[in-house]
Image: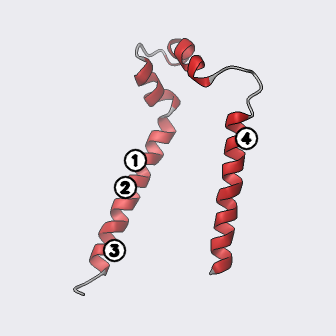
Amino acid sequence: MRTVIVSIFVAFLFAGVVFLYTVHGDTTGVDIASYYIYNFAADTGAGNAVAAIYLNYRMYDTIFEALILLVSIIAMLHFFRAGGSK
């Protein structure tokens, strides 16, 4: 069991390092915030920058956040029912 936990921790650590490298390893010199501000209309066709960011640029992030929330609610309901009358 301990090796499984250590393996999961190492996998998350590796994924975090890869994520940080891909986010901060950009050599073009373009700041992501200024890219969003100046290019959201051309990239997405949206008239509102906030809607463009939520619905186009961060769509998968929003979907996975909702999925994590749903899974946590289902898990809590399961734990409440599995607890019985203690």
- Provide residue 8's location: percent of width, then percent of height: 64, 66
Of callouts 1 and 4, the N-terminal one: 4
Of callouts 3 and 1, the N-terminal one: 1
Q: Which amino acid does label 4 sit on?
A: Tyr
Distance from disc 3 to disc 4, alpha carbons, whole Å, reads 38 Å
Q: Name the residue under label 3.
A: 79
Q: Quadrant of the N terminus?
A: bottom right
Q: Which amino acid does label 2 sit on?
A: Leu
Question: Dot 4, how many residues are within 10 Å of its Cα: few (below 14), some (14-19), or many (20+)?
Answer: few
From what the image shows, is residue 77 above or below residue 47? below
Distance from disc 3 to disc 2, alpha carbons, whole Å, reads 14 Å
User: Residue 70 got which mark?
Assistant: 2
* Residue farthest along the left direction in this orientation: 85
Q: Quadrant of the C terminus?
A: bottom left
User: Residue 21 got which mark?
Assistant: 4
Of callouts 3 and 4, the N-terminal one: 4
Q: Residue at x 45, y 22 (%)?
A: 52
Q: Mark 1 points at which residue?
A: 66
Label 2 element class: helix
